[in-house]
Amino acid sequence: MYSEDLAVFFTLKENGGLAEPGVYDGATVAVLFDAAYLEQVDGMVGNTEPAATGMASIFLVSAVGKTLAIDGVTYRIRTREPQDDGATVLMRLEKT
């Protein structure tokens, strides 16, 4: 288990941190959000899906299928992937 204080990453931008506010299970949570985009490389269009990183203690296994709203857009959590540190999870999102 990762022993460093992750608060610096999960402090909201409005408070000088890196995280975006999101609404999950009726509560405001801090997430690191990566919005989707389309990119053309060598004549082909690649797609990246939106994703968010959050604290594993908040986004339990039961988070899959639930919604996370970020900046007025609601996403369904498609996957929950524990990261190497054990304290965070990467969630693949899909607009609802």
Image: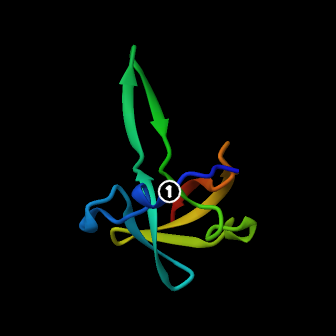
Q: Which amino acid is tagged 1?
A: Leu
Residue at the location (39% across, 19% down)? 41
Residue at the location (69% across, 65% down)? 64
| Element carrying mark 1 | helix
Q: Is residue 89 left or right of residue 96?
A: right
Looking at the image, residue 38 lies above or below residue 40: below
Residue farthest toward the bottom in the current orientation of the protein: 26
Residue at the location (69% across, 51% down)? 86
Count of numbered badges drawn on the protein: 1
Looking at the image, residue 48 lies above or below residue 60: above
Query: Residue 96: horizontal and vertical position, in percent?
Result: 51, 67
Query: Residue 90: horizontal and vertical position, in percent?
Result: 59, 51
Residue farthest toward the right in the current orientation of the protein: 61
Q: Quadrant of residue 89?
A: bottom right
Residue at the location (63% across, 72% down)? 66
Q: Is residue 86 left or right of residue 26?
A: right
* Residue nearer the viewer, 24 or 75: 24
* Residue nearer the viewer, 39 or 88: 88
Q: Quadrant of residue 37?
A: top left
Q: Quadrant of residue 62?
A: bottom right
Mark 1: few/some/many CA within 10 Å (<14, 14-19, 20+)? few
Residue on which the image places disc 1 = 6
Query: Residue 6: horizontal and vertical position, in percent?
Result: 50, 56
Q: How is the image coloured?
A: rainbow
